[in-house]
Image (tube, coloured by chain):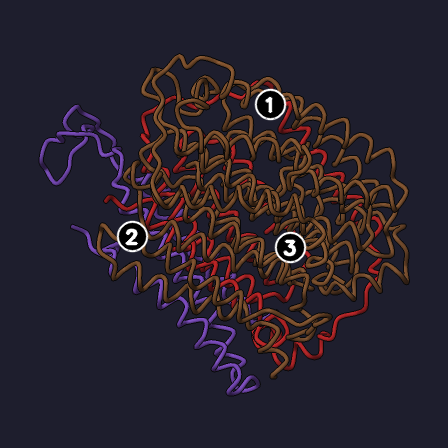
Chain colours: A red, B brown, C purple
Amino acid sequence: MEQLGFYILAFLAIISSIFMITRENPVHSALWMLLTFFSVAGIFVQLNAEFIAAIQVLVYAGAILVLYLFVVMLLNPKSKGFIRIPFRYVLGIVASFVIFVQVLLTLQSANVIGKAGVYTQEAYKQYGNVKLFGYELFSNYLVPFEVVSIMLLVAMIGAIVLAKKD
Amino acid sequence: MVENLVSIMPELLMTIFGLILIVIDVIAGKNSKSGVGYFGIFFIIVALLASIPVGGFKIFGFGGTLVWDMYSFAFFFVFAIAYILSTLGSVDYLRERGILKGEFYTIMFFSIIGMMFMVSATDLSVLYAGMETMAISMYILAGFEKGNLKSNESGLKYFIIGAFSSAIFLFGLSYIYGYTGSTKYVDIANMIQANGLNNFNIKLGMVMMLAGLAFKISAVPFHMWAPDVYTGAPTPATGFMTVAPKAAAMGAIVRFVWIALEPAAAQWQLFFSILAVLTMTYGNLVALAQNNVKRMLAYSAISHAGYMLIGVVSANELGYQSIALYTMIYGFMNIGAFTIISLLKNNGVIENERIESFAGLGKKYPVVSLAMLIFMFSLAGIPPLAGFMGKFYIFTAAVKSGIIWLAIIGVINSVIACYYYMRVTIFMYFKESEYDVDVNMKPASFIASMIAALFVIIIGVFPSFFMDLVKYMIV
Amino acid sequence: MSGYLPIALMLVIAALIGLISISVGFLIRPRKPEKVKLSVYECGMPEFSDARQRYNVRFYVIAMLFVIFDVETVFLFPWAVSFDVLGLFGLIEMIVFIIILVFGYFYAWKKGALEWA
């Protein structure tokens, strides 16, 4: 049953991402990307990573996609001045083949040499993904979390200073 | 608890000062935005003085994710130099272009916090978060001159390629985390020690991570963004961008390979020695053909990254000390040179930064030309100036650890480099001026370039004092 | 895992409703095309320009601020869930995080990034 769910979601993700890169209209591409985000969120749920799935929907499907659409609308939609990269199909196929082989090799030699994680299935069942994630983030990964706030502050100042009329 | 606070104290102090800087920027009137920069200089000096550690001081915090020691402090010192000089050098340039905004200084200030986290990180997640803070600030600085298409191009190009390199870094990081089960440098080192490197995935992860870091120092073949970005960005921002982020990435690389990859020394030494040779040679050869001095210095910035990489490859204490010394010297001479370039104003038809603008400058503006001469000689590595001492220590470190061939390639490269640096001085002193060139000399940028020139001479003449200082700092 | 079955069912039903209503309409509606019927209109008025124009860059600033505060909210969520374990220390962490971003909010406000005019 879970296998079936994965296959459906993975198929959906692949199909929608193929549509995303082949559409001429950028708005259509963005909408296909939305479908990709949702299917990937579904896969995250199946991997017991509910928080990541929630982020995927809230941040990516919600906020980032809106930003994409705004950027698309900022550009002149009638312009046909797209740069045609020579051999783009060949380049694309080679690049995706390389990544495919890389993933394949990774899966083949999947022997984790590191120590096993603390959070087992039982802990997950007892506390839930979000709670464990929150505990880890706010105890062991506290410093990067606070650095992220500085990063967001810089991004905010930068966006305003670059995009605001003065 | 106290340990945690002490280990993060400098960054915390800088963050508080940065937030105050935002308030100052909001309060300051339209014509007094340069005050934000001056306050920033004051704050950074206070933070620098407040965080001087005593010798051999080393304190870990937050479960070993962060460390504050002499090494972090040495790099903080380099960032502070870069900040002070570029701030002083930028005021007049920005005012003339009508882009004198407080944000320029605020963002530069916050980028330094990111760089400090990069250098003092002993955990990959902190390293990544700091690196992104630095990178985002740099994208903004590169595209700061909104009305200038070249600056726009520079910012956009830097952003796209920088985001790409961050993605590669993160991908490699995920491999390393997946196969060692930890993001802490110490744990990674233990895992490699125990299990060796004979795993395809950990090798792949290492290569991708180091490639991501090599993007940040613009090492060949990960350099393609550098010339356009450095040329297009506002000149004082270029001065800052060629020094501080490079120093930060160098510090992070050294700390990472020193702790995490210590058991796998042979592999990464090979990786970095290839990068070093390619970077030096490519940067110097392409710089030979440039007629735009700003672009020439952009390529020379690439080649200087190659010299610094020799220090990484030599992998001994002298190597790491000389990297810190070199970045400091490089900060003085490069920001000084960029400050002078930013002052030139060509009233003719050609761009301000073309080499023809320098023709006949020696007679018209003797002081500025002398400073430029000092910077060029120092960048070329001519004794008794600071640049020579920096290179000398780096090559000594390479010889000491038995990598003589790399030192020889480095020396050959600095001989090649002499040609294009000398060309500028030849134009200044032996050519008649073709165009009407003004040097827009104002007190702030004059002070910046004079301080830089003074330090280039002082470090060159009394290198042992500074080397002792760095030695004392980095044990 | 089984808790997600209703959601999956709901998604399927939602997709079906859309598909069915469109296809039923397609099958049973009369088709008598004529020139006026096929023309583009907005609220009965004749159109005077194309809708596909460049948008103002202000939308971008708003969207960017939205993304940043969205990410901030996302961090609040696991913090709230695990607050009982984290206690006072967690509260201090979150206060520091929010104070830093409040400065950004203050900046955006004072620079007039939140105003439209």
The residue labelled by disc 3 is A6
Q: Horizontally, is C39 left or right of B396 in the view?
A: left
Q: Horizontally, is A15 left or right of B149 in the view?
A: right
Image x and y of residue B53, in percent? 63, 71
Q: Residues within 10 Å of mark 3 (few under 14, many from 20)?
A: some
Q: Nearer the viewer, residue B176 or B42?
A: B42
Q: Dot 3: what SS? A: helix
Q: Amino acid at mark 2?
A: Lys
Q: Dot 2: what SS? A: loop
Query: In this rendering, does residue A16 appear at all?
Result: no
Q: Horizontally, is B407 left or right of B155 in the view?
A: right
The residue labelled by disc 2 is B33
Residue A140 tag number: none
What chain does mark 2 sit on?
B
Query: In this rendering, does residue A160 appear at all?
Result: yes
Q: Nearer the viewer, residue A43 or B359?
A: B359
Q: Residues within 10 Å of mark 2 (few under 14, many from 20)?
A: many
Q: Are marks 1 and 3 on the same chain?
A: no
Between tags 1 and 2, which lies in front? 1
- N-terminal of the pair, mark 1 or mark 2, is 2
What chain does mark 3 sit on?
A
Between tags 1 and 3, which lies in front? 1
